Amino acid sequence: MLILSGKTRVASISIILLFFLSSIGSPVAMARGNATPAPLAPALSQLEANWGASSGNLANWNYNPQNQINSSNAQYLGIKWLFPLPTHPTALLNVAGGLGVGPTPIIINGTIYAVTNFAQVFALNAANGNVLWTDVIPIFPNSTVGHYVAAAVRLHLHNGHVWFTTSLFNHTPALWVASGDNKVWAINALNGKYPAIQSGPSQITVDQRTGILISSEQSGTSPATGRCFFRGWNVLVTPPQLMWTAFCTPPQPGGNLPVDPNWTVNQVNGMKGAQIFYPGPQYNGGGYIPGTAVVDLKKLSSAQLNATLYDDWGYVNQSPACKAYTGGESTGSTAAGWGSPWVVGTGPTAALAFVGTNNRDPYTSPCIPGPDLWSAAVLALNETNGQWVWGFQTAAHEAWDYDCAWQQTLGNETINGVSTQVLWKTCKNGYIYELNAQTGNMIWAWTPPANILPRCQNCYMYNPLNRTQMTSSFFTPNLRNSIHPSSRSDRPR
């Protein structure tokens, strides 16, 4: 599936299909030039014909088991149809944002569901591209006014902004869309009608087994960043009811709660697992890195833990220089990761949701004297009560825009003869991690060997136990100095 756009401000969806008989297309056998036509292939199974989530399935495998398209017949692939996409609605022509489809389209039983960056939803017949129905979600330039967020309307969606369920609403298939104006829409996938559900901010995950929707708010690199949080909603009732709010950073100055320099220490003490990735100089050459290359916060003494995490974000004991910069308000924060969908657990992790977080905002390192938990991290959240189960930070005192918004995939691996549920995670620091999905403990990490893809000399992970590194400046000073204070966010603090 290709998403194309051009200077004419018109985009199109093109479907490249093997011209064989399948369960989602008409039986066609074609060849180019003098090539010998390929034989008709058997019909695809439902699993093979569907692309049930924006990342393939609910475990984010990005994989389809079909084998009809292979090295022996790829030369017969061709474009079967094109669907031109409209430009922005008139009301949004002056709002910044991309054209075309943002999230990867979902294919269910021969219907393609595609959502544009400006939240027009299309249901298309996969066989011929005909429109079955379309909806324009009502977004206006002032849609976020009064929503207690500093961000304006965003016309920029990712895979984590869409979800598909089949068992909710009396088993009515529903397409969920988190639009760029901090609303969530549940749309009847059969006819495009909206159920009476509009609630919550941006990226979402929906567990249709429990009827719980998890949402959060994204953030850019700004000193206006509010407190990091995730929320759980009961979507089995109308309107949805807020069940819990789980914070991932301490209360900020100027908020409705007093600042607490011990907040992060207490949070870690209440978690099942808490690790920070630190490979150290011995692994600067890259390649395989063992599970011991971490600082395990749960194994530190009380004195070590306190020395490492006390006033982690620097909200309490701001220096005169920091107060001059912040005005005595927040030194920064983090927020939910964007991009790849979060993952809902299954089997031994059925009650968990795995979520990622953003980079640290902003890059004012001397004012934030700690690892800055939980920026650039992946965390496991109990979806029924909002309790944090474990956390794994990939970059202590993150100073490179190395957010953890990217892929997380749930699977099973046999380790020492035991089938173990694992979470594979990638972040922008260039490592892939395998974590025990139940405990969050790292099993291994890997990065390209330095002789293949060398790192810059300032791009190695910091040691969370090194106080000098935990107060170091952003490694590109001119970029750090280009960030200035602005109006503070009114998100929860």
Image: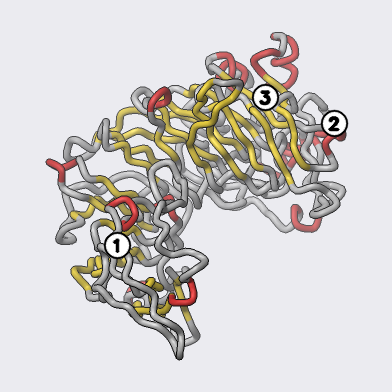
Viewer-nearest residue: 237 or 472? 237
Q: How is the image coloured?
A: secondary structure
How far apart, in angstroms, are the residues tagged by discs 1 and 3? 63 Å
Q: Which residue is mark 2?
A: 468
Q: Which type of secondary structure does the marked residue at label 1 adopt?
A: loop
Question: Which quarter shows the N terminus?
Answer: bottom left
Q: Which residue is mark 1?
A: 42
Callout in the foreground (1, 3): 1
**Among the two numbered marks 1 and 3 on one chain, the one whose residue lies closer to the N terminus:** 1
The amino acid type found where label 2 is placed reads Thr
Image point 84% across, 47% down: which residue? Answer: 458
Q: Position of residue 404 (x, y in %)?
A: 59, 43
Check the image and name the residue furthest to the top: 302
Up the image or down, 480 lies above or below 138; here it is above
Up the image or down, 137 lies above or below 159; here it is below
Image point 45% across, 42% down: which residue? Answer: 342
Residue 145 appears anywhere in the view:
no
Q: Position of residue 487 (x, y in %)?
A: 55, 51
Q: Which residue is mark 3?
A: 311
The amino acid type found where label 3 is placed reads Asp
The amino acid type found where label 1 is placed reads Pro
How far apart, in angstroms, are the residues tagged by discs 2 and 3? 15 Å
Image point 40% across, 67% down: which residue? Answer: 101
